[in-house]
Image (cartoon, rainbow, N blue to C red):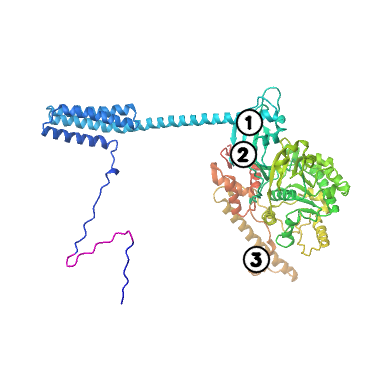
Amino acid sequence: MTTATETPTPGAATPPRPAKGKKEEPPAPPRVEVDWTSWRHGPIAAPINAGGALAATALVGHITDVAPVCGIGVGVAAAVGVTVRAAMKDISPEGLAARAACWLGAGGWMTWTLGGAAWPTAFGWLIAGTVGAALAAPEMADHESRVKARAKAAKDEAAATEVKIAANKALAEFGAEWNERIARVCKVQGVTVVGVEYWPSGVGYTLEARLPAGGVTRQRLANFTPGLATDVPLPNGCGVEIEPGKDRGHVLLKVSTVDTTAQAIPFPDDYSPISLNDLLAVGMHKGGAQALLDLLNSRAFIAGQIGSGKTNLLQVINAMIARCTDALNWHIDLNGSGMSSPWLLPWLDGEMDAPPIDWVASTVDEAVRMINAAIRVAKARKQAYKRLMRKLNVDKLTISPEIPGIVITLDEGAEATAANRGDTRLATGLESLITISRAARLAIVLSSVRGTSDLVPAAIQAQAGTKIAMRPADAAEAAYVLGWDCQKMIDEAANPGTGIIRQPGAPMRSLVAYQLLPHQIEEIAKATLARRPTLDEPSAQAAGDDYKNRWIRFGDWLKTQGEEAPMPPAPRTPSDPQPERPKAIQLPELDDRYKGPGGMARAQQDMQDALEKAKERAREVQAERAAEEAGDKPAVEQRPAADVDAAFNELVEGWDVKLSDVDEITRLLAEAGPAGLPVTKILEALKAAGFGIERATVYRRLDAMGNVKKLPEGGYAIKPDPS
C-alpha cells in the first residue's frame, strides 16, 4: 500500500529531521523583545528622570574622584546640544532658554557637589530643582502648544494669502480676457469683470461685470450673446445669458460650459402636497436652477411644433396642479383627449373612485359650456367673497382647499381658436375669461403648434404674461411668441424638451422640461386623488347643470369613440343633493374641565356617558310606542338590551362623535406648556388621533386661534393668561 507524502511548498522553510539514534532536543523558549521606541518622556516625568540620573552620575563621580570642573563642562555641552536639537524642532526662544537653563543648572550643581558640598544639602537642592522643573514643565508645554498654534495660524494665513493672490491674479487674467472679448464682440470699451463664481454643478460660471460710464446698458451687451458664445468658443447647446446685477451699473454674465439639455431630466418622484400659491417647478435652467411658473398670477401660452416637447410640458404642469391641495384642473382637449387620457384611464378602468381631472371638454360644444361656466364662476366669486376679500384686505381672492383655484388647460388651441377652422364662440369666450378671471383665481394655460395670429388671436396672446417657445424651428417662429430679440437664444433650445421662456419682470432664459412618462402620470393621479378639493358652493351653483352633468356628457362622448369601459359613478359636488343623515352631536366649547393632562380621557368618558343615557332613553321610547300600538299603556316594558343596542347602533351609524381638530390642537399645546410644539409634531398627533388633516389646514387653524402665539424659534404655544 502506498501512502501519500506531502510535498513541501517551494521556498518554504522545511524543519530539519533529527539524526537517527539521537534524542530530539526540546524547543527553545520564545525570545521576548521589548519595543523601547514606544516609551516616551512626558513633560513631568522628564525632569524627574533627569533628576534621578543626575544624582546617580554625581554619586559615581564622587566615588571615582572625578574633577569638579567636569560637571560644568558636561552641563555646557548638554545645554548646547539640547538647544541645537530643540531649535531644529521649531521650539520657541522661551523654550530654548528654559532647556539651556536646566542643563546649565544641572552642570553647576554637579560641580558644586563634586567640589565637596555636603550630600544632604546637595540632594536637598537637587530635589528642589527637580520639583521646580517638574511643576514648570506643563506650563512650558502649554506655552509651546500656543506658540505652535500661532505659528500654524500664521502659516495658514500666509498660504491663504498666497492662494488669494494667485486667485486674484487668475481672476485678473480671466477678467482681462473677458474684458477684451466684450470690447471685441460688443464694441463696448471699459467693461470690467470684478468677480467670478463657478457653479457647484461644474457646468458653468457666472461673471460679475461693472459697466463703464456713458450710459451703456445691460441690453446692449445682451444683443451680442451669440457672438460672445462663439468667441469663447462654447460647445453646442451652451451659451451666455445676461442678467441684472446688484444695481444698474453691474451685470451678470451666466456662461454654461456643458450642454445640460442633451439628456432628459426625469420628473421628480416627490408627490407631496403643494399650493397653487407657490411657484411650480416644471424643469431646469442652465446651471441647475429650477424653471418656475406662476400660474396663479400670469396666464401662460406655450407654442411648439410636433415633437418639440410641448405636450410633455403640459403634462408636467398638470402633474404640478394635481399636487396642489387648493386647485382644480379643467381640460379643453379637442385632439381626441390625448392630453387627458393618461389621467383618466385609471378611473375608467375602475382603479380609482373618481377622475383626477375635475372637468374634461373633448368637443367644441363642451368647451364652450366650460368657458361660459368659468365666466359665471368668476363673476359669482367676486360677489360671494367680496366681504372675505375686504376682511383679508386683498384685491384678489385667497385660494384654499375650501375655495380652490381653477386652472383651465387648453391643448392645441388652434382646433378651438384658429381663424380658418376655430369656433368664434370659444375664441370670444376665452378672451372675455382672460380679462375677468385673475381676481377670481381662474388661471389659463393655452397651447398651440404655432404662435401666429391666424391660430391664436393676438388679443389672447397679448394677455399671456408667461410665454414659452418649445424647440423653435427658427427665429421667425420663435418671434411670433417671444419677440424678435429671442433670435440670439435659438441655438440654446435645439433638443427635444427644451425651450425659451419669457416671464414678466425677468429676462428670457432657456429651459429643459422634466420628462413625464404615462406610468408616472398614473402614479401621481392615484397618489394625489384623496387630497383633490371640491368646487366651492357659490362656484358650483354658478356653474349650474353644465358643471353638474359634465361626466354624463363625457360618458356619451366616450360611447362615440367606441369606449366600452363602464363609467363609475361621478363624485358628488357641493351642489349635488346629499342624503339626509343624523346631525353630528355638537359638543360644547372646550372648557377648563377638558384642558390640561387627561382632558381627552375625560371628554371621551363624558361622551360615553351621554351615549349610555341616549340608549336608555331609546329603550323607554321603544317601550312606550309598543304599549300605544297594543291599545293600552302598561308599565314601561323593557326590551332585551341586545335588541335595543342593535337598534341604537343602527340609528347612530355615521354620526360624528368627536372633538374638533381645534380642540385637539388646544389640548396638545396646553400639555406642551410654554415650550410649545412644532407644526410637524402637531400634525403627527392629530393624525394619530384620527383627524384627516393636512399641514396647510393646521397652519390655517393655528393662525385663526386667538389664544395661540407663534414662537420666535419656530412652533406654536398657548398665550399666557394676562391675569
Give the answer, above or below, for where 346 lies relative to 701: below
Marks 2 and 3 close (CB-CB < 8 Å):
no
Residue 12 inside the magenta-drawn segment:
yes
Label 3 SS? helix
Q: Nearer the viewer, mark 2 or mark 3?
A: 2
Asked which quadrant contains residue 584, the reply is: bottom right
- Measured as percent of width and height from the top left, residue 249 is found at 67, 26
Which residue is label 2 attached to?
204
Q: Using the rendered image of the protein, determine whether residue 612 is visible from the camera's viewpoint.
A: yes
Image: magenta residue range: 10-23
**For residue 433: magenta?**
no
**Residue found farthest to the top:** 214
Residue at the disc numbered 3: 645
Q: Amino acid at mark 3?
A: Asp
Q: Nearer the viewer, residue 527 or 518?
A: 518
Q: Nearer the viewer, mark 2 or mark 1?
A: 1
Q: Earlier in the sequence, mark 2 or mark 3?
A: 2
Which residue carries the number 1 mark?
178
Mark 2 and mark 1: span between their CA atoms?
15 Å
Please tell me whether residue 187 is drawn above or below residue 365 in the rendered image.
Answer: above
Say which amino acid is labelled 1.
Trp
Q: Secondary structure at mark 1?
A: helix
Who's the residue at 82% across and 40% down the image? 435
The residue at 67%/36% (across/down) is: 229
In the rendered image, is residue 394 in sight?
no
Front one among 648 and 155: 155
Marker disc for residue 200: none
Type of the residue with mark 2: Gly
